[in-house]
Image (cartoon, rainbow, N blue to C red):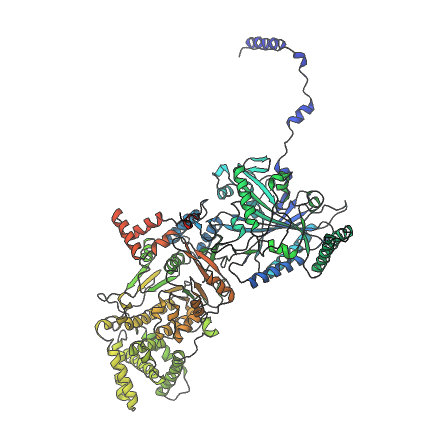
Amino acid sequence: MDVKIFEKKLIKNIKNIKNIKNIKNIKNVKKSDIEKQYQVLPSISDYLPWLEFSDEKNLVLLEDGKSVGALYEIKSVPTEARPEEQITSLHEKITRLLSALLPLENDNPWVMQIFVQDDLTLQPIYKALEKYIEKHDQADDPFAQKYLEIMQDHFKKLTSADGIFVDPMSDLKFRGKIRRIRICIYRRYNNVDKKFNANVVNEIETICQKFETQIRQIGIRIKRLNGAHFYDWLVRWFNPNPSTTNGDIDVLLQKYPYPNNEKPYGWSPSQNIFFGNVESYDNGWIFDGIKHKVMVFKDLDGLIPIGAISREMNMGQTQKYAIFDKFPPGAIYTIQMTFESKLAVNVHLDGIESAAIGKSTVIKDIHDNIQRARYEMDVGNLLIRSTEAIYFCAESDAELNKIENNLKSALDTVQLKVTNTQQEIYPKDLYLRFLPFNFNYDFDKKENFRSSYKYGSDIAKLIPLYGRSLGDGQNPLHIYYNRGGEVFMFDELSPEFKMANSHMAIVGTTGSGKSVTLNNMILTLAAVRNPRIIAMEVGGSFDLSSQYLEKYGKNVKVIKFDRMSPIAINPYSEAYRALAIIEMEEAAVLTAQNSAVIEEIVLDDRSEKLIKELHSTNADATDVEIECIEDRDILNEMVIATRLMITQGKTQEEKKIDPTDLSLITKSLIHAMKTCRKNHVPQMLLTHVIESMNTLSLSSNSDDITDRLKKFATRLEYYKSGIRGQFINTPSEPLTDFDFLHIDFGFMQSESYADLMNIVCVSLLAKILALAEANKSSGRPTKLFMDEAHVLFKSDLVAAFVILMAKVARKIGLWLTPCTQNIEDFTGIESKKLLSMMETWLCLSLEPDEIDLVSKFKPISTEMRSLILDIRKYQGIYSESVLIGKRFSGLFRNIPPSIALALAMTEQTERAYRKKVQKKFGVSELEAVEYIAGQMRSKTNEISDEKFFFY
């Protein structure tokens, strides 16, 4: 710009300024005016106590710069459907715990805050599932990836705001969640002199060690939380609907994670946990547009039940829930306790006693209460200053009022009263007073007056430690849910779960959901652990699961028996392996003088062992048998198969078999093996066993022995030819490896072919044993499901064979899962013994008389009986089951992904609908299944009593 033009403009502007009226009234700007412009308005952060978090010590430094606190998370104790004696016992333990949990100080007493809330996310469970799959080297497996995709979608449905269904037991939306119980312990050093130099870190560390030990002693699981856990908690609390991530808090935490490594200078939890707008309003605070307020409990004025807040209780004829289940999403219940010394409490009691002058009934009651208080303290039932409150939130005042009224109604049912939030004088201040590490004993005692003295026994009723079972709580193989929506998980193959073995029996009445349970278990096992899975059945329940597994990359084999297409299952295919073992035993008998004597010694030893095995009258497995550490005995397996053919599995014929018969069968088998090897026969068959029996009968000097051998040979002829011979008297190949083997006995389930099914079953089991044994060093276990086990175990010899398998399980990694809806059919000694070897039981739904039957195989405690009797099932919504293990037990709901439900649809109407879908869209049966799964939604119970009223 030209200089002259610039000067002209400048002069013009100056003239304009001089023309402004009242120019003389314009004051000079002072320094104080500028300072006012830079003044910081009050912020919620200024009232929060979290100055810094030490990642090295896992301690919170509070705003005074000298007080510190520690943060924990604990797991509640399962109490659902438990006997009252057990509940009372737990309550007494918690009461005693409170008397010794923290030191009782005269000045600056210790404070313990407990917060319970539901994190309405299953993302941590999903992450744990991913890690568990990686742990078992399945991360790159196509089916594992498909399963993760399925579970991601399933968890999303479970945690949706509308829930996956309305629970008939509580009339509440059923949502997946993680119930968090957090504990803050700290000591505020308010009353200290200038020379205060206590090592507060060492002090709290000592207290924490004792605290953790005492908590664990009463069976409560506890974890010390770190900075990331604390940050996660606060971010979820104060950012309920983050706009930057469309309301998704999980995504917000991924976007802005806790700075584990180097924190920027000045980083503070109080300043760095807010990612949205914070405002105040008349009754509290607004975070992300959501209004928050707090409601405080009144003093107790009557008896309250044990576990008043968190214990599941009967609430009517069919309703059952915990009061906390009725709390709205985002609600937090807190109880805050101050552990004063007995001296301080007695000073308080003395003050009341000295002021209570007179002879009225009221004065007398005061003195009586003081006397009782002193007695209770002497016996360990402390007087503890405490206050309880509920944080809750909603988008509008109208909704907040509705929630408040609902909370009051729910609390009324357990004799708890709360103050009216509209009457609070300083609601914004009150909201802050009960935040983590922010409760100030001195301030509350002198100014706030919220806490009051309660007996430890009453506080023990209010503490939210009474919960529901979570299974083993650490191994996300089988994922179910308890009645509160928390994940119930377990892995029967895990060392943390089992004690002696991983055998598991599954029992339930018809319609209890067994088919869905089994199909879902197979899917989860195949995806997460990838054991070698065999499903043995007589009804076609696993046809679709076989196809589904194969579609997504699993190596699937199917053996489906058909009269028109016989499949050779030779029971003697491993004869030469058995012979090698026998000859090793013969070589070990060095004291004998000739080969004939050696053979007789080994034969006698074998016969004695077999007689003991098959003629035992003890229906209970011994401790050694339950350990499942014996060696495999192929010869015994072949003896059982031969005996089955001789007797056809008929009970009356079985009773005629005596020790001499067993010895003759064993001798015939050894003779056949040696003869076949001498003649270079590729594989020993039934024909060769018959020939050996006939040969031995001719060489015997005893007419009785001759007659027996001839009778045996004649009976075996029945299986030499015809349809039975095509299956049994034909060379067969060993099983090649697989991921999933589906065995369907097909036509053999009819009564006329029951004998053939028994023999084929035993022969197949021998092949499964051989495969498991051959791969025992691979580290990959084998899991054998035997559906309709009552049909298979009608023959005691089949059960005896399975016992042989069970005994060698640990050495070869072969674990059995017999499943049945007819527990009453397990009457034989062998089948009873087999079931007594099952360490883990899954009871889907049982009548009282069926529980009595189960107790013959598995000891059922009063607690477990109570749980099983409490099982509920609502068609199309969910079915419940009870897990009984040596280490972990509990009640859970089977709410599988929709694909598991669709694969298990075997009812006539379900098959018809599937056909209809196939025809409509021109797709395969498996594609129809996936379509149905995609469309599937749980039935929803309407919350209405209309159906009970008639006009």
Q: Within the image, what quadrant is residue 432 found in? A: top right
Give the farthest residue toward the front.
951
Q: In the image, is residue 202 above or below residue 767?
A: above
Q: Within the image, what quadrant is residue 747 found in? A: bottom left
Give the residue drawn at x 48%, y 69%.
859
Q: In the image, is residue 870 above or below residue 799?
A: above
Q: In the image, is residue 188 above or below residue 10?
A: below
Q: Within the image, what quadrant is residue 513 found in? A: bottom left
Left/right placement of residue 9 relative to residue 812 reads: right
- Horizontal and vertical percent position of residue 716: 26, 78
- Horizontal and vertical percent position of residue 215: 61, 58
- Horizontal and vertical percent position of residue 135: 46, 56
Q: Is residue 174 visible?
A: no
Left/right placement of residue 247 relative to residue 677 reads: right
Give the residue drawn at x 66%, y 24%.
34
Q: Is residue 222 visible?
A: yes
> Number of numbered discs present?
0
Left/right placement of residue 628 relative to residue 453 reads: left
- Horizontal and vertical percent position of residue 314: 51, 56
Left/right placement of residue 101 relative to residue 595 reads: right
Q: Nearer the viewer, residue 383 or 685?
A: 383
